[in-house]
Image (cartoon, rainbow, N blue to C red):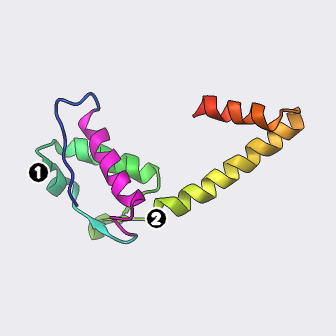
Amino acid sequence: MIISVDPAAAKPPYEQVKDQIDGLIRRGELAQGTRLPTVRQLAGDLGLAVNTVARAYKELEADRMIETRGRNGTFVLASRSRADDEETRAAATVLARAARRAGVSLPEATEILRQAW
């Protein structure tokens, strides 16, 4: 797993770490079940504070991208594309039903979604 952090970037280091791991999972470069480095190991490799990497991992866990299993380590969960598909379909169904009940046209609903994006 190759990750780098740019200290001069506008984005905080924890977001850079989070976004890069997220991208690796989305592209399939980190498969389901892959064990990630420990927080301490990755922090040392990147020259970051342990809390910085811990925050990135915590946010990835909240997004259901990874899972920490105590002393066993931190692992990649199911591929993000499958999770996205299920969540996105459910949200789209809710939006479509609510729009129809409110008499909103498809172009209007699409614009609402675009603005929310």
Question: Which residue is the site of mark 2?
Answer: 79
Q: Type of residue at label 1?
A: Gly
Which numbered disc flags the more N-terminal residue, 1 or 2?
1
In the shown orientation, is residue 113 left or right of residue 80? right
Camera-side residue: 108 or 33? 108
On whether residue 94 falls in the magenta region, the answer is no
* Highlighted magenta segment, given as a residue range: 12-31
In the shown orientation, is residue 93 left or right of residue 20? right
Q: Which residue is drawn at 54% across and 63% down?
A: 82
Q: Residue at x 38, y 59 (%)?
A: 25
Crowding at label 1, few (<14), some or many (≥20) Cα neighbours within 10 Å?
few
Q: Which marked residue is nearer to the observer: mark 1 or mark 2?
A: 2
Provide residue 64's location: percent of width, then percent of height. Answer: 47, 56
Q: Type of residue at label 2?
A: Ser
On whether residue 26 falls in the magenta region, the answer is yes
Q: Residue furthest front?
A: 107
Marks 1 and 2 sit apart, C-alpha to C-alpha, by 27 Å
Provide residue 115's location: percent of width, then percent of height. Answer: 62, 28
Crowding at label 2, few (<14), some or many (≥20) Cα neighbours within 10 Å?
some
Question: Which residue is the site of mark 1?
Answer: 44
Q: Which residue is drawn at 31% across and 49% down?
A: 20
Provide residue 101's location: percent of width, then percent of height. Answer: 88, 38
In the shown orientation, is residue 13 left or right of residue 88? left
Q: Quadrant of residue 8?
A: top left
